[in-house]
Structure formats: structure tokens, C-alpha cells
Amino acid sequence: MREDQNSNNKLTQRTVPAAVLSEQLHHLEAAMQLPSVSVGIVPDSARRYGLWQPEAFYMFDDELVAVELVSGLLEVRQPGEVALYIQIFTALAAHAAHGAAARVLITAALERLGA
């Protein structure tokens, strides 16, 4: 079965029960209202040719990146390595939906969950 190109499977990926995922998506919607929060969602339909997203990572600034691995959390502090994550983040952000467009994707995900 082929998924709709705008389905954003990552928003509804069942790593937790649907009720928990629904709660997380509602929390994300609420957090988006805060002036200090910027949320970008890369739609499944985005053309990311040549752009491979590695493991999950969190950039705190231009000096520290935390990388989630199966075996634990890795802190990246080497300037050259941090620069690679900044490059990946910048490329992903260019494809991301923000603001109202991101809210549309979250709403669609909640509808698919039946929330």
C-alpha cells in the first residue's frame, strides 16, 4: 500500500501507543506558540536528493551537538565535526515546513491517529 506523499510518516511512527503520540503532537502544537520555539517539519514529500539524514541529533550551539546512538548519547565538540552537523541541519531546515504549514502537517497526523 502506498502512503500519501504528504502523510509525514515520521509524525505518526508508532514507537509509542497512539494516545501517547497524540499527546506529544498536541504538546508540539502548544510549544509552537512560544516565541522562543521554532519548529520545522521536513515533509515526506520533500526532495532531499543527496541529503542523507544521519541518526537523531540535537544542536545546542555551534560548539556542541548531541547524537543519539543505540548504545547511548554521544557529545560532539570537535569544530570540524560540529560543522558537518550544522551543514546537515541547514540543508534539512531549507526543506522544512514552518508555522502554519507545519501545523497543517501536525493536524493531518493527529487526524490519522484519530485524535
Image (cartoon, rainbow, N blue to C red):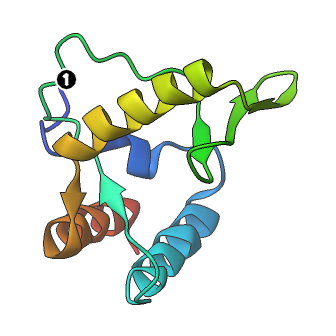
Query: What residue sits 43% from the left and 50% below the top?
Result: 12
> Which quarter of the rendered picture does the N terminus lie within?
top left
Query: What residue sits 58% from the left and 52% below the top?
Result: 61
Q: Secondary structure at mark 1?
A: loop
Q: Give the image location of residue 112, x and y in percent.
A: 31, 59
Q: Quadrant of residue 95?
A: top left
- Is 64 above or below relative to 3? below
Let me know if residue 55 appears in the view.
no
The amino acid on which the numbered mark 1 sits, given as a three-letter code, is Arg
- Is 22 above or below relative to 77? below
* Residue furthest to the top: 50
Horizontally, is 87 left or right of 28 in the view? Answer: left
Horizontally, is 33 left or right of 76 in the view? Answer: left
Query: What residue sits 36% from the left and 16% below the top?
Result: 52
Q: Quadrant of residue 39?
A: bottom left
Q: Give the image location of residue 103, x and y in percent.
A: 24, 73
Let me know if residue 63 appears in the view.
yes
Q: Give the image location of residue 16, x and y in percent.
A: 66, 51
Out of 104 and 39, give the one closest to the viewer: 39
* Residue furthest to the right: 71
Residue marked by disc 1? 48
Q: Give the image location of residue 88, x and y in percent.
A: 39, 28
Query: What residue sits 60% from the left and 37% below the top?
Result: 57
